[in-house]
Amino acid sequence: MSPVIALLLPKSKGKPEVSTWFRLQAPDNDSNMCGSTDRLFDGLNGLAVCAKCGYKTDPFYINPAFRVKRRVYDVSYTYDGYQIVSRKFKEACLRAKLTGVGFQELPADSEFFHLKPTAVVSFDGERSHTSFLRRCPACSHFRDIVGLNPACLKSAPTTDLSRTDLLFGSGNEMHPLIILSETAKDVIQRERLIGIRFDSVRV
Ligand SMILES: [Zn+2]
């Protein structure tokens, strides 16, 4: 069959779908931004905490004293769910002019950043079989949001990096998923950054 005819034919339904969106996965960096899943550090000024359930209600609060313990990775997670990236990661994103990128500075650690994409994409909890458990009547947050098998978005992101509107995990470790375009994945792979895995995401 000529390549032109092959292009004109409808895609076979039996073929596995080729993903063009990916979820950023990384190892832990043996650090805690605000505490553990169930306990917060004392003395975190300005951190919003629910008076009833005791969990933090701001997933993006930065502890001004935070420093990364295991410093070998370019992308890693704290035990309480913060995606931490190296200066090398940040510079690679900026050099490639990837869209949707956003970084929060760490006041006590200038070599690392909290990755917080500016663009938000809707996660499809229904298709992903996500469970929402133990809702707090005071702050309306769920204690656990689990299940993303398979991970599905409601629509395709419009930027290279984005974060899901839905946060996953338990208690204080609730965090969004980081979604990457194929371009962003290629940039990151070319840089040989340490610690990164990519999982497919469906749209
Ligand atoms: Zn609460």
Image (cartoon, rainbow, N blue to C red):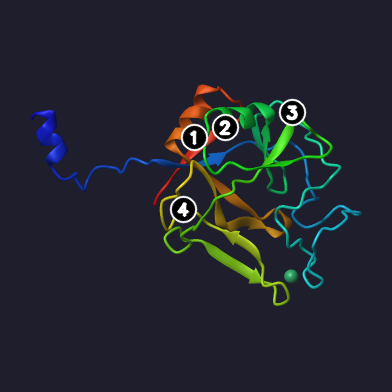
Q: Which mark is residue 184?
A: 1
Q: Which amino acid is tagged 1?
A: Ala
Whether the residue under disc 4 has CB within 8 Å of ligand 1: no
Q: Secondary structure at mark 4?
A: loop
Query: In the rendering, at what x and y percent does residue 18 appear?
Result: 33, 40
Q: Secondary structure at mark 1?
A: helix
Going 70% across and 55% down the picture, which residue do you hit?
Answer: 59
Q: Which amino acid is tagged 4?
A: Asn
Q: Nearer the viewer, mark 2 or mark 4?
A: 2
Q: Which mark is residue 93?
A: 2
Whether the residue under disc 1 has CB within 8 Å of ligand 1: no
Mark count: 4
- Nearer-N-terminus badge (1/4): 4
The image quadrant where one finds ligand 1 is bottom right
Query: In the rendering, at what x and y percent does residue 101 appear?
Result: 58, 41
Q: Which mark is residue 86?
A: none
Q: Secondary structure at mark 2?
A: helix
Going 55% across and 22% down the picture, which residue do you hit?
Answer: 192
The residue that label 4 is drawn on is 149
Neighbours of disc 1 within 10 Å: few (<14), some (14-19), many (20+): many
Whether the residue under disc 3 has CB within 8 Å of ligand 1: no
Q: Is residue 80 left or right of residue 45?
A: left
Going 80% across and 64% down the picture, which residue do you hit?
Answer: 49
Quadrant where the N terminus sits is top left
Q: Which amino acid is tagged 3?
A: Arg
CA–CA distance between discs 1 and 3? 23 Å
Q: Is residue 11 left or right of residue 114?
A: left
The residue that label 3 is drawn on is 71
